């Protein structure tokens, strides 16, 4: 039976949960996720769990934050004057925005705090600092 190795294109179904059991993402009801193992297309901990699996095999893997989206970095938060935020942007905590860096790159941020004078934007991934659990099923090795 063929086993997954780095460089193989695979398709998986998955359900990702947090330590409290909350599901944060799933492929249920969608096409399987397709990617090349070892290419850096998915988080490192999930990528590392696939070699050696066979089509049809299922397993659950626990991935520490360092092998997922990393630790929460306090330096990735920045306060900007509220007056610099365009009026059409809703200033609600949790709102996801996309900013453009001076180099032209798009950077997703989340509104973390709003005061009378400033808005704090957080560029950490929403799952930074979280240990994750994935129930995976290897659908196919292409």
Image (cartoon, helix red, strand yellow):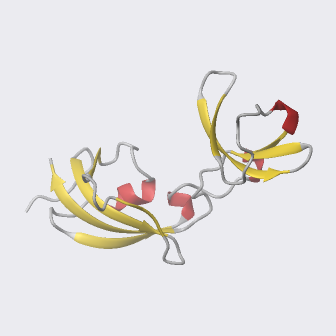
Task: Please report the residue visible at 29 percent of the width from the left and 45 percent of the height from the top.
Answer: 35
Residue pushed farthest right? Answer: 117
Q: Nearer the viewer, residue 26 or 57?
A: 26
Q: Is residue 57 left or right of residue 108?
A: left
Count the numbered circles shown: 0
Quarter assignment of residue 65: bottom right
User: How far across and down, in percent of the image, does residue 24 sit?
Assistant: 48, 63
Is the N terminus in the top left, top right, bottom left or bottom right quadrant?
Answer: bottom left
Furthest-front residue in this view = 88
Where 48 sits versus 88, above or below? below
Along the line of sight, the residue nearer the viewer: 4 or 103: 103
Reply above or below: 96 against 46.
above
Residue 44 in percent (x, y) is at: 44, 54
Residue at x-position 50% and y-position 73%: 22
x, y percentage for residue 64?
52, 66
**101 up-or-down from 49: above or below:** above
Where residue 137 appears, as percent x and y from the top left, is 25, 65
Q: Is residue 37 above or below residue 137?
A: above
Name the one closer to the observer, 81 or 4. Answer: 81
* Residue at position x 16%, y 55% in the image: 140
């Amino acid at each position: 039976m063929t086993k997954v190795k780095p460089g193989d294109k695979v398709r998986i179904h998955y359900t990702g949960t947090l330590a409290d059991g909350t599901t944060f993402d799933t492929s249920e009801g969608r096409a399987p996720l397709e990617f090349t193992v070892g290419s850096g297309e998915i988080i490192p901990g999930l990528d590392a769990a696939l070699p050696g699996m066979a089509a049809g095999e299922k397993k659950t893997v626990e991935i520490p934050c360092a092998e997922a989206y990393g630790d929460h970095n306090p330096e990735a938060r920045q306060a900007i004057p509220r007056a610099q935020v365009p009026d059409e942007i809703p200033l609600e905590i949790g709102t996801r925005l996309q900013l453009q860096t001076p180099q032209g790159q798009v950077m997703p941020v989340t509104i973390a705090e709003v005061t009378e004078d400033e808005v704090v934007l957080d560029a950490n991934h929403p799952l930074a600092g979280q240990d994750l659990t994935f129930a995976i099923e290897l659908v196919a090795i292409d």
